[in-house]
Each structure stands twice: as structure tokens, then as C-alpha cells.
Amino acid sequence: MQAFDKATTLSGNVHEAWNYKGYVFEEMGKKQEALESYTRAVQVKPDFFVALNNKGLLLDTMGNHKEAIEEYDRALKIKPDFDAAWFNKACAYALLSNEENTLVSLRRAVELNPQFKELARKNPDLVIFGNNPEFKKLVGE
């Protein structure tokens, strides 16, 4: 952690150091510290869509799905073709039982990256839509 602390004080890619620090905190189970690190990464570089996505993922694991969707939307405003953010947004909507927005977001993720079809079939967040004909068509079942 000392190396990350030093890296976050140096010039250059400080935003990436904050992002990686957030990831390490997450792996250590320190969710609040991870959240603060991702937030700091975006403060340093407001268009850092990867950190916004990571913050969204963390918020999802914390049960804050609406806030997570806001972070995915922020990332997508910067990079509209960010397939992972579309997929993560679909999962967050699924956890809110919002079928329409789940399918809209998943459709966009699959359009951008067909590999998300297989991930969607296996993702536990999306299992509630397994019998939905549109979901089946979308993921190739």
C-alpha cells in the first residue's frame, strides 16, 4: 500500500494509481476505502471512465444499484461504446427487477461485444430473465 500512496503523490498517471489502489482495497475487503480511491481517481481525471465503471461495480456489490447505474451512465457519457459498462448496467437493472432497462442495456452490450451473450447466460444477476423470450433471443438460446 505504501507504493500506491507514493504513486498517488507523483505527477503523471496519478488517476491510474488511485484506480489500482481502489482495486487493491476492494480485494482486501475494504469497500469504503476502495470507494474513496475510485472517487479520487475521477476527481483527478474526470473523464476516467474505467474508474467510473469500477466505482459502479463496487456500488453494486454494496447493494447500491441505483447509484451504480449513475456511475455507469457517467462512464457511458464519456465513452458510449464501453461495452463492459453497458453489461454492468444491465446487471444492475436486473438486480432492481427492471426488465425493460435490463434488456435495453444488455442488447447494447451484445451489439458492441457478442461475447457478452455467453456471459449473460451464466450471470447470476440475469438468471431471473432466463425464461424471457426476448432475453433468450438476445443471448442466443
Image (cartoon, helix red, strand yellow):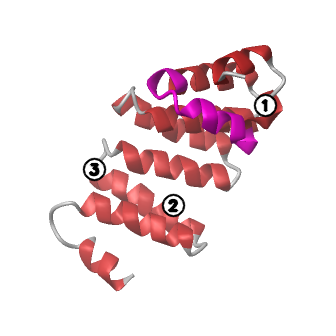
Q: Residue at x 32, y 78 (%)?
A: 5
Q: How far separated are the C-alphas under marks 2 and 1?
A: 25 Å
Dot 1 falls on a residue whose secondary structure is loop
Q: Nearer the viewer, mark 3 or mark 1?
A: 1
Label 2 belongs to which residue? 35
Q: What's the residue type where badge 3 is placed?
A: Lys
The span shown in magenta is 110-125
Q: Residue at x 29, y 58 (%)?
A: 15
Q: What's the residue type where badge 2 is placed?
A: Leu
Q: What's the residue type where badge 1 is placed?
A: Ser
Q: Residue at x 61, y 19 (%)?
A: 104
- Whole-percent x and y of residue 49? 37, 42
Label 1 belongs to which residue? 97
Q: Residues within 10 Å of mark 2 (few under 14, many from 20)?
A: many
- Whole-percent x and y of residue 17? 31, 66
Q: Nearer the viewer, mark 2 or mark 1?
A: 1
Do the residues under discs 2 and 1 have CB atoms within 8 angstroms?
A: no
Q: Residue at x 82, y 33 (%)?
A: 128
Residue sitting nearer the eye, 131 or 31? 131
- Whole-percent x and y of residue 133? 78, 15
Of pointers 3 and 1, the one earlier in the residue sequence = 3
Taking the view exactly as shown, the residue that stands out farthest to the front is 141
